Image (tube, helix red, strand yellow):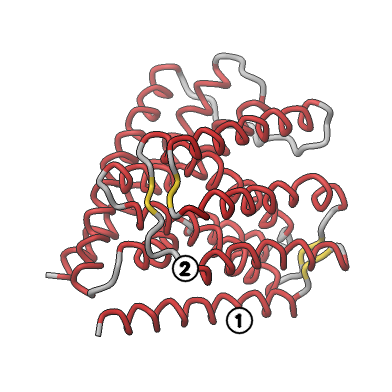
């Protein structure tokens, strides 16, 4: 029954989100206990922790020969991040943007999106494409470390420090929850796709992407309500770059991905969303409430198109 699969999907995504939180706590605590600098923890452990749900679900999907869900997860998550998360945050409270963000951070989001679109022209992401994306991700990490070392990046939040045994325990428990939860979620989402007569790609672009973007959405909305909506933008920039360069890079390197079913509307929405974000930021050094509503309307239009296409294909 489809309700059982929906329940399995909910349990799976809950386990993934909980596992990512515990994995990050354990890894951050262990790193701090081993005297690893805060900056390094923030740029590696914490950053990976926020991208862990997308990473494990995409990797498990690819290993189970569900390329559509793996690609849809990343493309959908990045669209969700810009159009829904930034849009909703800005609609609640306009987001002030620093010149440094426009010059140094947003270009990475645009460049990684352009590189991904270019590599997709042949209809697949090969192992070589995965190596290219991973190599560029290495350059991004080096660049970010340099900025942080020179004092141009925000300081990482000090993680809670537990004993070594407790830290290792949460690290392993979180990793287990990530792996098992990902498998349960992918199985449930695939069963839902079959029951509804839609493709894994559509499920990846909607249900999977929305599920893995829940932590960012919750954090950004809470930040906006507290008048700290600028945190939403930094969250989106880092997440989008990680999703494309690290997640798709490693996933394609492990298991080449077929892009059958991904349309130019999907690619166009992905690219246009980041270009819109850059333009809004560049013109007034902020994303206004009206522009936030514009992003939300764009998201609603894309979601309507996805649902319309899925229903047409199911008939």
Which callout, 2 or 1, points at the residue further toward the start of the chain? 2
Point out residue 236 in the picture as x, y percentages from the top left corner.
63, 54
Whether tag 2 and tag 1 are in contact, CB under 8 A, the answer is no
At x 62%, y 48%, the residue is 115
- The correct choice, above or below, for 265 with respect to 63 in the image is below
Residue 35 shown left or right of residue 58 in the figure: right
Q: Is residue 236 left or right of residue 19?
A: right
Q: Secondary structure at mark 1?
A: helix
Locate the C terminus by quadrant.
bottom left
Q: How many marks?
A: 2
Q: Quadrant of the N terminus?
A: bottom left
Q: Quadrant of residue 262?
A: bottom left
- List x then y, in percent, for residue 283: 87, 67
Residue positioned 65% across, 70% down in the render: 87
Residue 63 percent coordinates (x, y) = 29, 41
Element marked by disc 2:
loop
Task: Say left or right for 239 vs 285.
Answer: left
| Residue 307 vertical placement versus 177 (above, below) | below
Asked if residue 186 lies left or right of residue 245, the reply is left
Query: Residue at the spot x=77%, y=27% of the render?
Result: 146
Residue in the picture at 42% in, 37% down:
22
* Viewer-nearest residue: 173 or 98: 98
Judged from this view, the residue extending furthest toward the front is 122
Extreme-left residue of the structure? 1
Q: Which label is found at residue 223?
A: none
Please provide percent x and percent y for residue 144: 72, 34
Separation of marks 2 and 1 at Cα, in angstroms: 20 Å
Circle number at residue 297: 1
Residue designated by label 2: 263
- How many neighbours does mark 1 have within 10 angstroms: few (below 14), some (14-19), or many (20 or more)? some
Label 2 Cα neighbours within 10 Å, binned few <14 / some 14-19 / many ≥20: few
Which tag is nearer the camera, tag 2 or tag 1?
Answer: 2
């Amino acid at each position: 029954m489809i309700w059982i699969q929906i329940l399995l999907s909910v349990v799976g995504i809950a386990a993934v989100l909980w596992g990512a939180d515990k994995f990050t706590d354990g890894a951050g605590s262990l790193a701090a206990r081993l005297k690893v600098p805060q900056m390094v923890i923030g740029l590696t452990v914490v950053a990976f922790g926020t991208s862990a749900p997308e990473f494990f679900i995409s990797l498990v999907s690819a290993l189970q020969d569900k390329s559509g869900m793996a690609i849809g997860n990343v493309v959908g998550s990045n669209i969700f991040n810009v159009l829904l998360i930034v849009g909703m945050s800005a609609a609640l409270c306009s987001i002030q943007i620093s010149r440094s963000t426009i010059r140094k951070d947003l270009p990475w989001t645009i460049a990684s999106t352009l590189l991904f679109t270019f590599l997709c022209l042949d209809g697949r992401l090969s192992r070589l494409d995965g190596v290219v994306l991973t190599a560029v991700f290495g350059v991004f990490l080096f660049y970010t470390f340099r900025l942080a070392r020179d004092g141009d990046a925000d300081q990482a939040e000090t993680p809670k420090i537990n004993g070594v045994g407790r830290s290792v325990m949460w690290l392993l428990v979180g990793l287990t929850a990530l792996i098992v939860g990902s498998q349960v979620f992918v199985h449930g989402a695939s069963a839902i796709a079959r029951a509804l007569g839609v493709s894994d790609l559509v499920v990846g672009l909607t249900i999977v992407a929305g599920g893995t973007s829940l932590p960012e959405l919750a954090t950004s909305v809470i930040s906006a309500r507290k008048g700290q909506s600028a945190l939403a933008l930094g969250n989106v920039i880092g997440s989008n770059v990680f999703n494309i360069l690290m997640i798709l890079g490693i996933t394609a390197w492990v298991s080449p991905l077929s892009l059958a079913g991904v349309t130019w509307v999907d690619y166009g929405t992905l690219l246009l969303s980041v270009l819109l974000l850059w333009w809004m930021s560049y013109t007034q050094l902020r994303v206004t409430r009206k522009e936030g509503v514009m992003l939300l309307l764009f998201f609603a239009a894309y979601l309507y198109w996805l649902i319309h296409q899925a229903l047409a294909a199911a008939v």
